[in-house]
Image: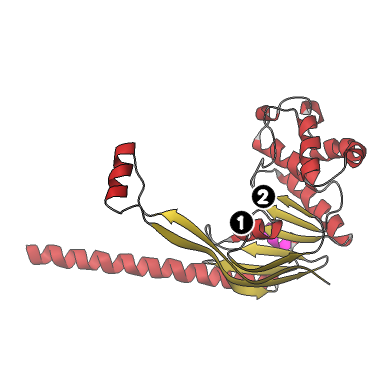
């Protein structure tokens, strides 16, 4: 059963070509017709299907479109073109601390975030203690979140999002700020959710995390899917592309050095 489906999904951003450092410069640019905008395509004709209880890893360089794709699946961003279909409730853990009010306590943020995820107050009350136990921050749960470390925020966010069984769980580098114990807790919880039928999308730069959690892998490059399939095969393709890019860059630098040396000798 297909739970997540993307068909021809593209997403464009419109950004200013020229930035103004003062009001005077802004009006000068307006008068001279320089306030033009350019279009940046973050996703390009993405086609993807994810089945029930699959755990799919999304890999690629920074700026490849990974987080953008997860935001589209979560409903945070709307695609410029194409269609997105998600069957069931989505529990996204995207940018660290999203949805938290840092002036409120950890306990108060449990209710706030759980409400945003669509849980009722009765469900939240029933799950509150297990959320606190899983996060491992009971001693600090009455303190304001602004006093928490990044790891504590990550623990609490993950505990809230996975306390009930969502149809789709979305993780964007959620284990990057955690310790080994937290990563193990995440892995075990994801295993439990997948066994219960939850579909999971994971973005990570850590190969170990991708190999441990995922049953399939997708490589994004320049907003396009360049490869998808078995985890080992896609990771190997990513490695080949990375080495090729490094070799190409090294070759260009060597040519530039040779040209500079020739120019210097000619000048002598």
Magenta stretch contains residue 211:
yes
Can you see residue 233? Answer: no
Which residue, as the protein is rendered here, is positioned at the far left? 268
Quick one: label 1 or label 2, which is nearer the N terminus? 1
- The x, y position of residue 173, in whole percent, is 65, 51
Task: Count residues near mark 1 (Cα–Cα under 10 Å), then give few for <14, some for 14-19, many for 20+.
Answer: many
Let me know if residue 198 is in the magenta part.
no
**Residue 215 image position (x, y, % from top left):** 76, 68
Q: Nearer the viewer, residue 45 or 27?
A: 27
Secondary structure of the residue carrying tag 2 is loop
Q: Secondary structure at mark 1?
A: helix
Residue 197, quarter of picture: bottom right
Judge by depth and name the residue closer to the eye, 187 or 36. Answer: 36
Magenta region, mostly helix, strand or loop?
helix
Using residue 255 as the reference point, say whether residue 122 is left or right of it: right
Q: Is residue 152 left or right of residue 30?
A: right
Give the residue at the far top of this rendering.
143
Q: Is residue 229 left or right of residue 61?
A: right
Residue interval drawn in magenta: 208-212
Instruction: Reply above or below: 70 against 45.
Output: above
Judge the density around disc 2: few (<14), some (14-19), many (≥20) Cα neighbours within 10 Å.
some
Residue drawn at the location 88% of the way across and 61% of the way down? 195
From the image, tell me which residue sits under label 1.
67
Distance between mark 1 and mark 2 Cα atoms: 8 Å
> Where residue 242 sits in the image (x, y, percent)?
50, 67
Q: Are marks 1 and 2 in contact (CB under 8 Å)?
A: yes
In the picture, the disc for residue 94 is: 2
């Amino acid at each position: 059963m297909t739970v997540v489906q993307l068909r021809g999904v593209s997403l464009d951003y419109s950004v200013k070509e020229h930035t103004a450092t003062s009001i005077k410069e802004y009006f000068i640019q307006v008068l001279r017709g320089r306030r033009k905008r350019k279009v940046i395509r973050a996703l390009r004709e993405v086609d993807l299907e994810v089945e029930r209880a699959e755990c799919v890893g999304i890999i690629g360089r920074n700026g490849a479109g990974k987080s953008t794709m997860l935001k589209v699946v979560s409903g945070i961003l709307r695609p410029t073109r194409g269609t997105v279909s998600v069957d069931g409730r989505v529990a996204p853990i995207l940018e660290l601390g999203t949805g938290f009010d840092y002036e409120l306590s950890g306990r108060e943020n449990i209710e706030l975030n759980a409400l945003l995820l669509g849980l009722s107050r009765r469900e939240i009350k029933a799950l509150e203690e297990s959320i606190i136990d899983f996060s491992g921050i009971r001693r600090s749960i009455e303190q304001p979140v602004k006093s928490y470390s990044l790891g504590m925020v990550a623990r609490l966010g993950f505990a809230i999002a996975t306390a009930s069984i969502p149809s789709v769980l979305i993780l964007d580098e959620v284990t990057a700020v955690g310790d080994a114990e937290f990563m193990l807790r995440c892995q075990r919880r994801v295993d439990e959710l997948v066994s219960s039928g939850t579909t999971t999308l994971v973005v990570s730069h850590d190969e170990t995390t991708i190999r441990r959690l995922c049953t399939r892998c997708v490589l994004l490059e320049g907003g396009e899917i360049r490869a998808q399939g078995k985890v080992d095969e896609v990771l190997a393709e990513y490695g080949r592309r990375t080495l090729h890019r490094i070799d190409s860059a090294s070759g260009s630098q060597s040519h530039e050095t040779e040209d500079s040396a020739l120019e210097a000798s000619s000048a002598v």
